[in-house]
Image: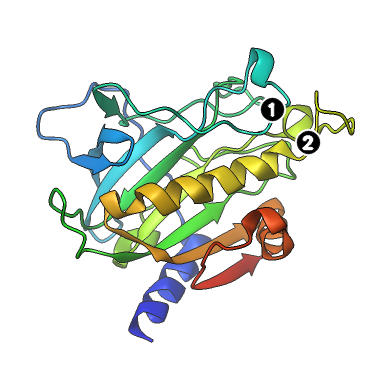
């Protein structure tokens, strides 16, 4: 019950969300580093609206760049990171009508946590909220100035936001192997698989995951409830904002 109340309280904060500060500065020696199955990842520290420290890891690659022969194909899991992965700045958005930076190489996610485990310590496990962004499946993304963590993170949770392919690049379907279709939704499934394998490194509990979405994100949550591709993944519960 206590864990559920934490999640509900964090969800209510969505309506009051404010932009997260952006920084293109190189990582400092004092920035937090976590250990995952893919390697070490370095982030930064920001603050919640009440001044609580938030460990921020932005722009983490979760799949190979969907370009060239991988364009219009299902996502391919990322290889292990070389060296310490720099996760201190927002990744570009997936292609869409906007003046913000975009790129076809856009399959990145962000992780925000209020407490990190020490190396090889699996005792720190917080509920995980996965927020699927809105935008009609053709716009928006996971940039921190849209989906900042300041109101979510007054509670002790782990928040994950992410980009997925949009528009033609994400949903074109010809019925043939060259463009099987719905790759934007398959990107979302790949994010869930990444979370299952790596979220413990950020203090998250892979067996206590809540999917949450607004508009197109809400539709996505419902689709995951019935999709065989999402079968077998354990969620604490699924919450949809329409």
Give percent across and percent down for residue 72.
73, 26
Give percent across and percent down for residue 113.
29, 54
Residue 18 appears anywhere in the view: no
Q: Give the image quarter of residue 85.
A: top left
Q: Residue furthest top?
A: 68
Q: Are marks 2 and 1 in contact (CB under 8 Å)?
A: no
Viewer-proximal residue among 112 and 125: 125
Give percent across and percent down for residue 145.
46, 39
The kind of secondary structure element at disc 1 is loop
Residue at image x 55%, y 27%?
106
Residue 60 appears anywhere in the view: yes
Cα–Cα span, label 2 and label 1 = 13 Å
Residue at image x 56%, y 62%?
212
Residue at image x 42%, y 31%?
90
- In the rendered image, which quarter contains the N terminus? bottom left
Name the image colouring.
rainbow
Looking at the rendered image, the disc whose residue lies closer to the viewer, 2 or 1, is 2
- In the rendered image, which quarter contains the C terminus? bottom right
Q: Give the image quarter of residue 241.
A: bottom right
Which label belongs to residue 63?
Answer: none
**In the rendered image, the vertical position of residue 103 relative to residue 125, given as above or below:** above
Which label belongs to residue 171?
Answer: 2
The kind of secondary structure element at disc 2 is helix
Residue at image x 65%, y 21%?
70
Q: Earlier in the sequence, mark 2 or mark 1?
A: 1
Tell me the crowding category of disc 1: few under 14, some 14 to 19, or many 20 or more residues within 10 angstroms, Cα based: many
Q: Which residue is mark 1?
A: 96
- Give the side of residue 48 with respect to residue 145, left or right: left
Tell me the crowding category of disc 2: few under 14, some 14 to 19, or many 20 or more residues within 10 angstroms, Cα based: many
Q: Residue furthest bottom?
A: 1
């Amino acid at each position: 019950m206590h864990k559920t109340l934490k999640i509900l309280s964090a969800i209510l904060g969505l309506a009051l969300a404010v932009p997260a500060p952006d920084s293109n500065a190189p990582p400092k020696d004092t920035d937090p580093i976590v250990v995952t199955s893919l390697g070490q990842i370095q982030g930064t520290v920001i603050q919640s609206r009440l001044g609580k420290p938030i460990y921020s890891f932005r722009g983490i690659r979760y799949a190979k760049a969907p370009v060239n022969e991988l364009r219009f194909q299902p996502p391919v899991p990322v290889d292990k990171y070389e060296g310490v992965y720099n996760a201190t700045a927002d990744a570009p958005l997936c292609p869409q009508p906007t003046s913000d930076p975009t790129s076809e190489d856009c399959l990145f996610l962000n992780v925000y946590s209020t407490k990190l485990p020490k190396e090889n310590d699996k005792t720190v496990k917080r509920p995980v909220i996965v927020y699927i962004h809105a935008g009609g499946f053709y716009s928006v993304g996971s940039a921190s100035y849209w989906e900042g963590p300041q109101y979510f993170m007054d509670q002790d949770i782990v928040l994950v936001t992410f980009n997925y392919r949009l528009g033609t690049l994400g949903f074109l379907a010809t019925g043939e192997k060259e463009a099987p279709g719905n790759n934007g939704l398959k990107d979302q499934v790949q994010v869930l698989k990444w979370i299952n394998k790596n979220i413990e490194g950020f203090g998250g509990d892979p067996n206590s995951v809540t999917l949450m979405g607004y508009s197109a994100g809400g539709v996505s949550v419902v689709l995951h409830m019935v999709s065989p591709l999402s079968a077998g993944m354990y969620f604490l519960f699924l919450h949809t904002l329409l």
